[in-house]
Image (cartoon, grey):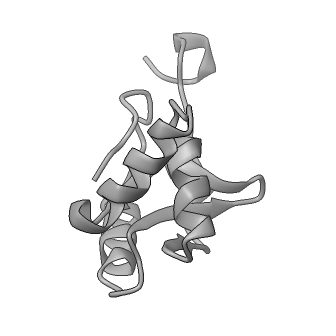
């Protein structure tokens, strides 16, 4: 499970949905599907399945979570979870954005 430190409203519901999704034997990585597409954080992964994808993305010059998502998608190992509260995924970088 990987979450960004600036997602203060991340809920147990989101985490539980991602963990449940990545239990699918075909899944290496599970992320939340938003209106903008798959969100890189939070992310659940099965390490043994995701590691070769991450290594391939890194070897190809990828240095971001999006590179891992792209590699998992190409391999058919990316699972997306829809229907979750988008407010739980809010990225808050400054107090003016609603935190504090």
Compare residues 37 and 57 and report the one nearer the observer: 57
Whether residue 42 sits left or right of residue 20 in the image: it is right
Whether residue 41 is visible here, answered yes or no, is no
Residue 49 image point, x, y percent: 30, 68
Q: Is residue 82 above or below residue 26?
A: above
Q: Image quarter for residue 19?
A: bottom left
- What residue lies at 55% left-to-right and 35% top-to-bottom? 62
Residue 40 location (% of width, % of height): 53, 47
Residue at 50% from the left image edge and 45% from the top image edge: 57
Query: What residue occupies the far right of the structure in this picture?
Result: 36
Name the residue furthest front: 59
- Residue 35 lies left or right of residue 19; in this view the side is right
Residue 5: x and y in percent read 36, 29
Q: Is residue 81 above or below residue 60?
A: below
Instruction: Say whether residue 82 is left or right of residue 53.
Output: right
Check the image and report above or below for 98 versus 83: above
* Total number of numbered discs in the rendering: 0
Q: Whole-percent x and y of residue 12? A: 30, 61
């Amino acid at each position: 499970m990987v979450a960004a430190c600036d997602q203060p409203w991340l809920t147990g519901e989101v985490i539980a949905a991602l963990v449940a999704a990545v239990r699918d034997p075909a899944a290496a990585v599970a992320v939340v599907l938003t209106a903008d597409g798959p969100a890189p954080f939070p992310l659940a992964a099965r390490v043994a399945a995701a590691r070769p994808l991450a290594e391939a993305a890194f070897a190809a010059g990828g240095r971001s979570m999006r590179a891992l998502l792209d590699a998992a998608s190409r391999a058919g190992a990316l699972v997306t979870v829809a229907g979750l509260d988008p407010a739980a995924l809010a990225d808050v970088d400054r107090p003016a954005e609603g935190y504090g």
